[in-house]
Amino acid sequence: MVVGALIVKHVEKLSDEKTIQAIQENLYMQYLLGLEKFTEKPEFVSELFVLVRKRLDHDFLNMLTLMLAETDGSKPKKEHTDEDGNDHGGTMKIDATCCDAEVRYPTDSNLLEEGSRLIDRLLDKFCARHKVKKPQTHRTEARQAFIGLIKKKRKGKKLIDRTKLIQIRCLQADFQLFLDFLGKQSSTLLACFSRHDYKCLQAAFKMYEQQKMMFEQNVRRCADRIISIYQPHLRPIVRGKAKTTVEFEAKIGASIVSGYTYVGHVSWDAYNESSDLSMQLELYKKRFGMLPKEIQADKLYLGKENRKHIKSCHVNCYNRPLGRPPKEENDTHAEDKKRAIGERNEIEGTFGTTKRDYRANDIRAKLDQTADTWIGACVFAKNIMKFLRGLLCLIFEKSGLKTFQKRIMSIFDSMEVVLPTPQGCVKEIN
């Protein structure tokens, strides 16, 4: 039921609350969720989505996608066996992309202001709970310096540095005051702080150390830089785009087999996707019991070591060879290379469809494990629509309504990127 609700959420691009409301009003959505009869009462509260995202992950949703491939008969079949005894079959397309997270663009002053506000809020919470007099902090001074900066239309470097210096000193004094104040209290009184409070406080400490180090050394970068106290897993990733140079997102490595997309790797740190190739081959063998007959990837995946690994696995890969190009290229190899480049474009279109139509480029989950499930659910929703497309074509093929079948195909082609139809579902439309 909850997986069906996730599908509704990402297909309709709704919030958690709006998803519950839409299911409550729609008979067909309730049928999708497996309810026996229509009901106007909500089956669960919106907070359940968070618990589900914590328990599920993209591996579980990949397993559901594999079940779809087995159902419509598009699972790759064995084609040949190599000299090492390994079976081969099917084609795997691999690539990597980034999915943006919903977070405010971070600045040093904003982060220091968040840390000062967090300390003040935790002190208010502790003193209100146990009716203790709140100690005097430097919150007012830090706030005045921050307001003086953001109200300026033109912010010069001297003003920014002076504001950061005041904020760092105030935050340092407030941290020391906070620790001394709690050290004088009984340890049993600290139960008023939740796990989320401790996590944010730890991120604020790390952020303060990073900001102090960068200010003292007059540098603009550091390792594992914190860009949000409330989402400490986010990291800046340099993309070099014309729109924005740096983005704050998750980097994912995915593969497409017979039109279905599988998420293989999710990372919040920047990494070289060429390291994913051997992992994707292992995942392919684990899912389908054999190695692919052909692998299609861009030149970033095809370094010297990866080419050796592909050759040792007896997997075909039609790409431009390393080194100086030959004077006369084999016509067969040229045709295969041209075909592989055209077929590999499918994964580029799939990334665009998943981001644009299913909100993979607008991650609103605040935890790293829930964001992982968010990405997997977006990809799974796209796979569900691909499965339904093939199912509709199969129904109209059996009924013989060729004209209506062409009309349905044109509607789906205008909705999303044309993906390969499942084997045995649709014959060629003349």
Image (spheres, rainbow, N blue to C red):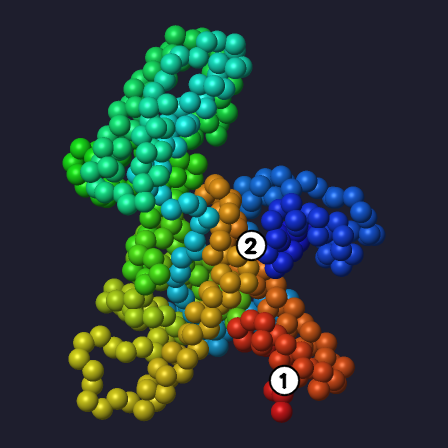
Question: Which mark, residue 1?
Answer: none
Which residue is the site of mark 1?
427
Question: Vertical placement of 38 versus 52: above or below?
Answer: below
Instruction: In this rendered view, identify the residue nearer to me: 276 or 87.
Output: 276
Mark 1 secondary-structure assignment: loop
Q: Can you give x and y, in whole percent of width and height, for residue 188 in the image?
A: 49, 11
Q: Name the residue at the right extreme.
A: 37
Q: Amino acid at mark 1?
A: Lys
Instruction: In this rendered view, identify the residue nearer to me: 360 or 212.
Output: 212
Residue visible at 56% across and 71% down in the picture = 416
Q: Can you give x and y, in whole percent of width and height, for residue 219 in the image?
A: 19, 41
Mark 2 secondary-structure assignment: helix
Q: Amino acid at mark 2?
A: Ala
Can residue 76 be spotted in the picture?
no
Q: Can you give x and y, in whole percent of width and height, for residue 109 in the image?
A: 32, 36
Q: Is residue 288 left or right of residue 220?
A: right
Residue visible at 74% across and 44% down in the picture = 43
Which residue is the site of mark 2?
377
